[in-house]
Image: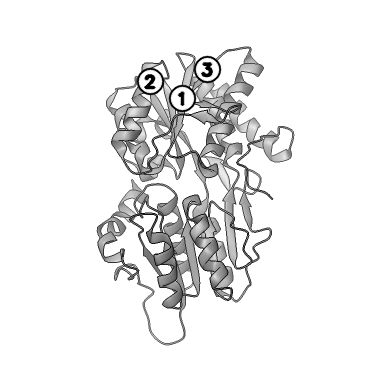
């Protein structure tokens, strides 16, 4: 609950932030005197309190500010995709030193505004527009999702696990690919036949909410997967996935959930239903980028940053309330997968993987 409470304030000030204005509570560098370095963030439509990648990116800015008091931070929450260009342009006009776009949905708008303002430093999470003044922060979450798929297969009592996404875009399907391959690796290793519902890696077809906010849509999709026999579900749908975690918690153990992006036991109220989380270490990537830029370093678009298991850019979270429920041998196998993937002994592939 720590992250959830830390971001409660952000949720309350979204109205003030909607027009490109900095929420007063967020512009809290304090002190007076020398020139401040301004880092300004534009959320995608998921909003600041999505318990997912927007929340994580804002945490990174907060951590950067803690490390360097000369950094001012603020954000604006996009209500619709039409807001992306407007909000980015608003921060250009406000002469922000570093403008951070969050989410793959913002790639096109960021590319357009960055190309029109070549001397402005931009950063983006979960995309790579291929523009010189945009520093891309991407994550090979297929690697950690592979571990989660193996774990889910090992924990399933029904022999069926499920996953669904918000939209069929690379930052989403990369999780689903890794999850499916982890299940397949378990089946091959153990001579089992655990099925994956909701995603077919070969055809790249599956179940989607077509939304990252509506919890009832997330619940509807996961209810269908559970009705087909899935007893572990991985939603890759931002806040919409909270419909799944809430229903899993209410089910009294009928099924459990693998969360994504930020440890669900620190960001949602549904820890008791969470087996683990496929973590994308956005906070550290954002913090490092902003601190370097504020220190005068020119952030290079190539190669940018790609987080993986080897550099701790992705991981799986602790088991928390499932700690005593996951067998020791399965824990050891999942940990060994991390070492093997990081060393290149096991190769995890996805069409959605970021280029290194």
Mark 3 and mark 1: span between their CA atoms?
8 Å
Quick check: can you spot residue 69? Answer: no
Q: Is residue 12 left or right of residue 126?
A: left
Between 116 and 122, the residue placed more toward the observer is 116
Find residue 78 and report its image quarter. bottom left
Q: In the rendered structure, which disc, 1 or 2, sits on the residue that comes first in sequence?
A: 1
Q: Where does the image place residue 27, in percent across and percent down from the top left?
A: 35, 72
| Above or below for 290 versus 207 | below
Q: Where does the image place residue 120, in percent across and percent down from the top left?
A: 54, 74
In the rendered image, which residue does mark 3 sit on? 195
Residue located at (56% from left, 53% from top): 127
Quick check: can you spot residue 288? Answer: yes
| Above or below for 274 versus 264 | above
Q: In the rendered structure, which disc, 3 or 1, sits on the residue that comes first in sequence?
A: 1
Mark 1 and mark 2: span between their CA atoms?
8 Å
Extreme residue toward the bottom, this view = 33
Disc 1: CA contacts within 10 A as few (<14), some (14-19) or many (>=20): many
Q: Where does the image place residue 12, in percent across and percent down from the top left?
A: 25, 58
In the rendered image, which residue does mark 1 sit on? 162
Disc 2: CA contacts within 10 A as few (<14), some (14-19) or many (>=20): some
Between 208 and 139, the residue placed more toward the observer is 208
Q: In the rendered structure, which disc, 2 or 3, sits on the residue that comes first in sequence?
A: 3
Find residue 254 and report its image quarter. top left
Residue located at (54% from left, 24% from top): 328
Q: Is residue 29 left or right of residue 317?
A: left
Q: Secondary structure at mark 3?
A: strand
- Where residue 226 is drawn, which disc sits there? 2
Between 191 and 77, the residue placed more toward the observer is 77
Q: Secondary structure at mark 1?
A: strand
Q: Are marks 1 and 2 in contact (CB under 8 Å)?
A: yes
């Amino acid at each position: 609950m720590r992250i959830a409470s830390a971001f409660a304030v952000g949720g309350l000030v979204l109205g003030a932030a909607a027009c490109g204005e900095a929420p007063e509570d967020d512009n809290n560098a304090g002190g007076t005197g020398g020139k401040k370095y301004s880092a300004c963030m534009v959320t995608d439509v998921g909003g600041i309190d999505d318990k997912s990648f927007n929340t994580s990116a804002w945490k990174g800015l907060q951590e950067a500010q803690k490390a360097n008091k000369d950094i001012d931070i603020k954000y604006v929450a996009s209500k619709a995709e039409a807001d992306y260009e407007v909000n980015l342009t608003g921060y250009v006009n406000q002469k922000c030193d570093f403008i951070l776009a969050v989410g793959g949905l913002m790639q096109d708008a960021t590319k357009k505004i960055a190309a029109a303002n070549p001397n402005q430093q931009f950063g983006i999470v979960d995309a790579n527009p291929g523009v010189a003044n945009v520093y891309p922060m991407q994550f090979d979450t297929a690697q950690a999702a592979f571990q989660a798929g193996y774990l889910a297969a090992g924990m399933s009592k029904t022999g069926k696990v499920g996953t669904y996404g918000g939209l069929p875009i690379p930052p989403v399907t990369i999780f689903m690919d890794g999850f499916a391959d982890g299940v397949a690796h378990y089946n091959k290793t153990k001579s089992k036949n655990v099925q994956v519902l909701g995603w077919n890696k070969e055809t790249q077809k599956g179940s989607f909410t077509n939304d990252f906010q509506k919890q009832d849509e997330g619940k509807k999709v996961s209810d269908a997967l559970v009705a087909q026999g899935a007893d572990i579900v991985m939603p890759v749908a931002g806040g919409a996935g909270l419909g799944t975690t809430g229903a899993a918690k209410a089910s009294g153990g009928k099924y459990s959930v693998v969360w994504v992006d930020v440890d669900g036991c620190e960001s949602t109220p549904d820890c008791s239903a969470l087996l683990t989380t496929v973590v994308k270490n956005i906070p550290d990537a954002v913090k490092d980028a902003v601190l370097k830029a504020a220190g005068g370093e020119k952030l290079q678009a190539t190669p940018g940053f790609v987080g993986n298991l080897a550099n701790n850019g992705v991981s799986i979270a602790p088991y928390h309330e499932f700690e005593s429920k996951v067998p020791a041998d399965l824990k050891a196998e999942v940990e060994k997968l991390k070492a093997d993937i990081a060393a290149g002994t096991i190769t995890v592939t996805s069409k959605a993987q970021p280029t290194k």
